[in-house]
Amino acid sequence: MARRNPHLRRWAGLSLAAGVLTGLALFSCSARAATPPNIVLILCDNLGYGDLGCYGSKLHRTPNVDRLAAEGMRLTDFYVSSGVCTPSRASIMTGCYAQRVDMHVSDRGAVVLQPVAAKGLNPKEITLAEVLKPAGYATALVGKWHLGDQPQFLPTAQGFDEYLGIPYSDDMVARPGQNWPALPLMRGREVIEAPVDRDLLTRRYTEESVRFITAHRDGPFFLMLSHAMPGSTPHPFVSPAFKGKSRNGAWGDSVEEIDWSTGEILAALKRLGIARDTIVIWMSDNGAPRRQPLQGSNAPLKGWGYGTSEGGMRVPCLVRWPGRAPAGRVCSELATSMDLLPTLAGLAGVKPPADRIIDGRDIAPLLLGQPNARSPHEAFYYYHVDQLQAVRSGPHKLYLPLENMLTLGSRKPVRQEPALYDLAADIGETHNLLDKHPDVVARLTALAERAREDLGDRGRPGKGRRLAGHEPTPTPRVMR
Ligand SMILES: [Ca+2]
């Protein structure tokens, strides 16, 4: 695939013909770029819906992320497929529910993969990076992976040319009674530092990202910057320049350092003259978990990370593509992280896999602000591990009646009473409409049954599941 010439592109952008073509593309049902756009996907770990200024935070200073919202589109009803890391990331990578690709539970029955895991994202799955490869993309993952730490499951075996990061969560350090190694920082397949200095992760990841963008300025490139922060520890890590600077402790410090990082990325794109050729997507992998005392915020949503509440699975998502995605627009249509794969494939001019079920849908019409564009999803399913706990369709969310609701915090069975909310009118879920709308309850109950059949439910295998990868003799990632 030939590399683009940025100077030619600039000329083309000025020409009348290109202007007409762009206009036509905006009104066609599948808008396609003339040349593939660069893609920067910034993914935070456990950052909540209410943690950013542009989503209402009065506590954190996030001017760079807020600028992304002002210059792009802010999605208010964007969901990840899980309240925890591994399944959420499996969905971003494959465009599928984690249950479909068997990444909803670890080989040890845990909610996420742990170090030295026998399980990993099946190399036969086609990742977002692999989808983009035929269009000539240079690809890099910088940061957290968490889809398998065995060599055949690592990013460089799953479509990424380059990798720098920790292959799982930042809290999975060496500890007594476990065979977990010192927390490894990897480059490619090699551990280059262990234990890694977590204070410097955000800074190093940012520097590496800017280096990659600069090296591949002629594009097209796909950079996934997968931050370790605010992360999974009770005390997020920050570099000395940000320590103690926010009004919200270590959590706020780490959010403000991520905002600085975002500013560095945007500045690099501008400096290199490729801002208009680059789609920037900024999101979190799940909601902020509950801490004592409180740290992150999912306000005004109810509930916390690690579960199926709105606070757990509805996350900030910003999309900036100057000249293509309307600036300053707010989109409240239901969209999901699974949509990224088919959407970005379409914008890159390549096809998503056609030989298997992909749950995500092309949301380019929404992102490009096409008139009357609507959510392509009839339903969205809230799973925790292998249990279906809720379903949303249109503005309505139905919490399913459960005798034994699985939760991360409690080993005792918890009951979930059925409840119905109109999220458009009642974002904080305060008015239970169960008795008012039996027709809606019946419709959502039928949709839930459709999901059980396909993706499974507690003790019931789904017909549409594919198997994860398995390594019979897993080894720890250690320095050589
Ligand atoms: Ca997470």
Image (cartoon, rainbow, N blue to C red):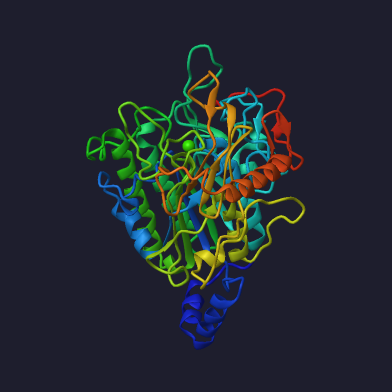
Q: Kindly give the residue lying farthest to the bottom in the view shown.
A: 16
Q: Nearer the viewer, residue 383 or 28?
A: 383
Residue 326 visible: yes
User: Which image quarter is the C terminus in?
Assistant: top right
User: Which image quarter is the N terminus in?
Assistant: bottom right
Residue found 41% across the figure and 49% down from its top: 426
Q: Residue 297's image quarter?
A: top left
Q: Kindly give the residue lying farthest to the front in the view shown.
A: 435
Q: Nearer the viewer, residue 146 or 274?
A: 146
Is residue 177 depicted above or below 163 in this figure? above
Residue found 52% across the figure and 72% down from its top: 5
Residue found 47% across the figure and 23% down from its top: 173
Q: Position of residue 281 (x, y in %)?
A: 47, 56
Q: Is residue 59 left or right of residue 164?
A: left
Q: Position of residue 278 (x, y in %)?
A: 47, 63
Is residue 155 depicted above or below 439 in this figure? above
Residue 159 visible: no
Count of numbered marks: 0
Q: Nearer the viewer, residue 6 or 346?
A: 346
Q: Position of residue 158 (x, y in %)?
A: 64, 44
Q: Position of residue 459 (x, y in %)?
A: 70, 28
Residue found 35% across the figure and 32% down from its top: 236
Q: Residue 54's image quarter?
A: bottom left
